[in-house]
Image: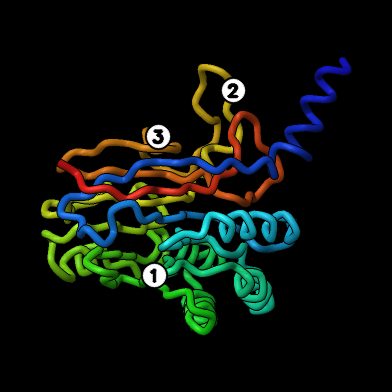
Amino acid sequence: MTACATAGAWAFWGAPHNVEVVRVPMPLRGLPDSLVGKTIVQISDLHVGPIVSIDYLRHCLELVSALEPDIVVVTGDFVSYDGPARIDEAVALLRDMQPGRLATVAVTGNHDFGFSREGFTNRQAADSLTEKLDGIGIRMLRNSAVEIEGLRLLGVDDFWGPTHELGETLSSGDADQPSVMLCHNPDFVDQPGWDDYRGWILSGHTHGGQVRLPFCKPPILPIRNHDYIAGKVELPGSRTLYVNRGLGYLRKVRINVRPEITIFKLSRAA
């Protein structure tokens, strides 16, 4: 009985904040010499709001800063949107994070569009978040791309939101450049339009399922394709997906699924 109580207490009070730094090699075709050995740090799903501890998130961002990344990427769900003040809270938190030496970029998640009976459709919320994050040096890639020393970083608006343009985003720039795509929801990788893309795709959204019992898949997953729960997935067409387990949560519980900061070390693929 005592063991069960201890495990339950850990699942609700300790595990949701037991963040793990995961190190992953990222080989990319045609990577310029200047970027070999550089790092990309990914965080996702902060869910700034009434449920996630702001002190815990501040600690996570201190860990990010301590890694001294060359590029920082945030793959959506900055907030659990319930009003304009929530965006201001997220911006105040992120203002103290050390930016990437070369760039700090991000994309929207579904909760950055708010929620109503019609779904995640509040464009004004996402636009306000974009404007204010741009103001502190976090460049939002909304169906657009940016080149950093020969590396193409792309970002598409959230799959559940009203403004995503995957085809337009993928067609921007030179498909032969080394490329990293940011898209909050990993279900995007099963959509048409990826034929010429050969690179990495960084996602979040799933929280790793938050609860994972031994030998079982998580009971609740907000994705169609349950192969994309967490971690690295090799896809057809020379694509590699990585799904970050996120930092925050909608319900304060994690079992066998630690929150995650991912650090990718760039190398040139054969």
Q: Is residue 179 left or right of residue 217?
A: left
Labelled pair 1, 2 in contact (Cβ < 8 Å): no
Marks 3, 1: nearer the viewer: 1
Can you say which quadrant of the picture contains the N terminus? top right
Mark sitting on residue 226: 3
Instruction: Look at label 3 and name its amino acid.
Output: His
CA distance separating discs 3 and 1: 34 Å
Q: Secondary structure at mark 1?
A: loop
Mark sitting on residue 102: 1
Point 23% across, 58% down: residue: 179
Point 28% across, 72% down: residue: 146
Point 40% across, 54% down: residue: 39
Q: Would you say residue 201 is visible in this rendering?
A: no
Marks 3, 2: nearer the viewer: 2
Q: Is residue 88 above or below residue 263?
A: below
Q: Nearer the viewer, residue 261 or 50?
A: 261
Instruction: Look at label 2 and name its amino acid.
Output: Leu
CA distance separating discs 1 and 2: 40 Å
Can you say which quadrant of the picture contains the C terminus? top left
State the colouring used for the structure image.
rainbow
Q: Is residue 11 above or below residue 65?
A: above
Horizontal and vertical percent for residue 263?
A: 45, 48
| Mark 2, other Cα within 10 Å: few <14 / some 14–19 / many ≥20 | few
Horizontal and vertical percent for residue 100?
A: 46, 67
Marks 1, 2: nearer the viewer: 1
Q: Secondary structure at mark 2?
A: loop
CA distance separating discs 3 and 2: 15 Å
Q: Secondary structure at mark 3?
A: loop
Horizontal and vertical percent for residue 150?
A: 21, 66
The residue at which mark 2 appears reads as: 213
